Image: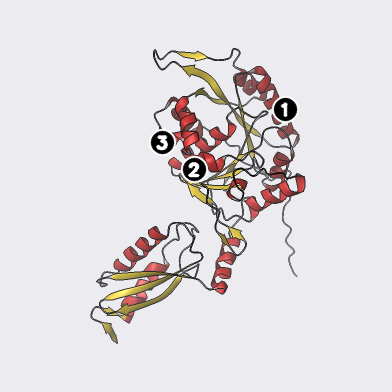
Amino acid sequence: MRLLRPGIDEDTLARVRTAVGGLTEPTLRHTLADLGMVGDVTAERDRARVVVRTASSAMPGQDELRADVRDAAMSVGTVPAVEVELEPMSEADRMQVARVLKAAPGLGSLGSRTRVYAVASGKGGVGKSVVTANLAAALAATGLRVGLIDADVWGYSVPQLFGVREAPVAIKGTMLPVRAHGVELMSVGFFVDDAQPVVWRGPMLHKALEQFVGDVYWGELDVLLLDLPPGTGDVPMSLIGLLPDVQLVLVTTPQAAVAAVAGRVAAMAKDSRVPVAAVMENMSSVTCAGCGTTTALFEGGAGKTLAEHLDVPLLGRIPIDPVLMQCADAGVPVVSERPDAPSATELSRIATALPYEEPTLAHRSLPLFVQSS
């Protein structure tokens, strides 16, 4: 066997290539070998040199990838040192990466194990988006792969709530969600200036949501949350068609008038054969910082009444908490920043209690297969 350098021969380099190729790319969730990312593996002086080809210079996690490649190469055992070089892919290689990503099962495909919850409210101002963001972060903290689509196109708030403003990376028509606090995110807010209003009507709304579902590489999520706009407009109807396994979670305040409007959203869901999974009551009470006494702000407990009327569980009552609002304004989920806060403990508990009804094939369009004789 031809010796390239002391301790580094062709067989060693082949094992380095195998070890590096078996790594999983942290964002794309495929092996480097499957993505065609392993370039030249050579010996230079007393070290191995590994070239990794990246699909975009804007790809997140490149420092992590470089360290993983170095560790994998060193794990071969007879390599004294490793140099890792990242270089851009050719257009043909980028196209191959896009083909690999597009071949992955979509969110709406049959047999998907992703639990999909649409978080809805009848009115704005009930804290639905803040609740949704913190549920996503709490679920991610348990080790689940969680995605969040900001479907409140006109009133998007996910970029603010997670403290991110970067544009998603695109690879030949496939977008990668933005990752923050362990959650995969997609929002119109990543594409427009904060001060720019989104003035879209039905067809444009549907096309944007269609792209968020079908043109974004979500991978194999455990849970997908949808932050719906308030009310019963075009967006909920579009998402029901795109994601037939979606289940509704209603957010209300204790006020009877607010819960009554949320009930209309539940009626829309029933007419569309979308199950209502649960109700959450936000702004239920306030705790005195001095004496610790908890006081209900509104009489009646309309959240409980609505849950009983719908025959679904009332998952919890989230208190008014200044820490929750401070974290939202700072762009960090309270469950991540202040897990001991009253709102954070209740939101984390609710996240682990989310019920899910296993979907059936009823009312779904099934693919047809023609068997040749």
Mark 3 or mark 2: which is in front? 2
Mark 1 or mark 3: which is in front? 3
Quarter in which the C terminus is drawn:
bottom right
Q: Mark 1 falls on what kind of element?
A: helix
**Which residue is at a point 39% across and 68% down the rendered structure image?**
20
Give me the C-alpha separation between circle 1 and circle 2. 33 Å
Q: Mark 3 falls on what kind of element?
A: helix
Give me the C-alpha separation between circle 3 and circle 2. 12 Å
In the depicted structure, whether residue 104 falls above or below residue 2: above
Q: Which residue is mark 1?
A: 264
Task: Count the marks.
Answer: 3
Q: Which residue is mark 2?
A: 163
Task: Say what amino acid the circle numbered 1 marks.
Answer: Arg
Q: Say whether marks 1 and 2 touch (CB < 8 Å).
A: no
**Which residue is at a point 55% across and 52% down the rendered structure image?**
177
User: From this viewpoint, is residue 110 visible?
Assistant: no
Quarter in which the N terminus is drawn:
bottom left
Q: Which residue is mark 3?
A: 337
Q: Position of residue 330 (x, y in %)?
A: 47, 37
Mark 1 or mark 2: which is in front? 2
Q: Residues within 10 Å of mark 2 (few under 14, many from 20)?
A: some
User: From this viewpoint, is residue 277 visible?
Assistant: yes
Left or right of 191? Residue 55 is: left
Q: Residues within 10 Å of mark 3 (few under 14, many from 20)?
A: few
**Quadrant in the rendering for residue 359:** top right
Left or right of 5? Residue 86 is: right
Give me the C-alpha separation between circle 1 and circle 3. 35 Å
Among numbered discs 1 and 3, the one appearing first in the sequence = 1
Q: Position of residue 69 (x, y in %)?
A: 37, 65
Among numbered discs 1 and 2, the one appearing first in the sequence = 2
**Which residue is at a point 35% across and 72% down the rendered structure image?**
16
